[in-house]
Image (cartoon, rainbow, N blue to C red):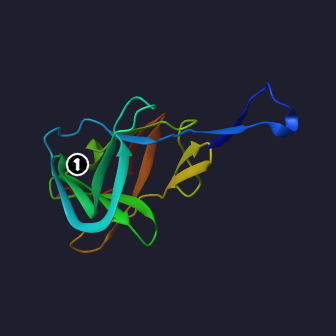
């Protein structure tokens, strides 16, 4: 967001414009996770990211981070991996959970903070997170068994800012 700030001591047509950039972020905070999960980057790509590592906005401490096609949090929950995908053709970040035999989907929960209002579910079952520039939409889950591609009936469950999943007839084996 860019706001024009004027100096009130000058004539209206000679006002000097100063610009202030404000940053907002939306955080997905995964709850009750394995704090010792192993993080694995997969397939380094040429892109990289620069971050300001200083808490003081007047000081800049640049941190450069390599980019990868995916990053896996192994056993973020027992027998459940969380995989983040850097999707270049869609210019975005996607994620999915890989639930292995014995994994319990009901353990997966995360809170969403930083949005202007609490998230909601739309008529399609998509998660909508309000922001100053429009809604961030996380599409309804699409799940299947990896060995058969048999689809699973799984939906978001939302209680205030806590997201979990509703599912029927899930086979834990």
For residue 31, above or below residue 8: below
In the foreground, 7 or 92: 7
Residue topped by disc 1: 104
**In x, y percent, where is residue 79?**
15, 52
For residue 69, above or below residue 77: below
> Is residue 73 visible from the viewing direction of this image?
yes
Figure label count: 1
**Which quadrant: the N terminus?**
top right
**In x, y percent, where is residue 108?**
29, 45
For residue 149, above or below residue 66: below
For image coordinates 54% across by 36% down, the residue present is 118
Secondary structure, mark 1, is loop
Q: Quadrant of residue 31?
A: top left
**Which quadrant: the C terminus?**
bottom left
Left or right of 57 in this view: 132: right
In the foreground, 92 or 53: 53
**In x, y percent, where is residue 19?**
64, 40
**In x, y percent, where is residue 166?**
39, 49
Badge 1: residue crowd in 10 Å (few <14, some 14–19, many ≥20): some
In the foreground, 1 or 129: 1
Left or right of 73 in this view: 15: right
In the foreground, 87 or 165: 87
* View extreme (top): residue: 9
> Is residue 144 visible from the viewing direction of this image?
no
For image coordinates 30% across by 51% down, the residue present is 64
């Amino acid at each position: 967001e860019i706001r024009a700030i004027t100096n009130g001591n000058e004539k209206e047509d000679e006002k000097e414009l100063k610009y202030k950039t404000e940053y907002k972020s939306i955080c997905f905070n995964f709850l009750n996770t394995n704090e010792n999960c192993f993080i694995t980057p997969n397939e380094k790509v040429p892109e990289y990211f620069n971050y300001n590592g200083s808490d003081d906005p007047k000081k800049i401490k640049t941190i450069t981070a390599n980019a990868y096609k995916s990053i896996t949090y192994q056993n973020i929950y027992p027998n459940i991996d969380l995989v983040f995908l850097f999707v270049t053709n869609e210019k975005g970040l996607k994620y999915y959970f890989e639930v292995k035999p014995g994994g319990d989907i009901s353990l997966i929960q995360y809170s969403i903070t930083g949005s202007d209002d609490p998230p909601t579910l739309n008529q399609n079952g998509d998660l909508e997170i309000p922001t100053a520039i429009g809604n961030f939409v996380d599409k309804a889950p699409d799940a299947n068994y990896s060995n058969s591609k048999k689809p699973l009936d799984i939906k978001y469950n939302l209680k205030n800012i806590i997201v979990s999943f509703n599912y029927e007839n899930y086979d834990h084996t």
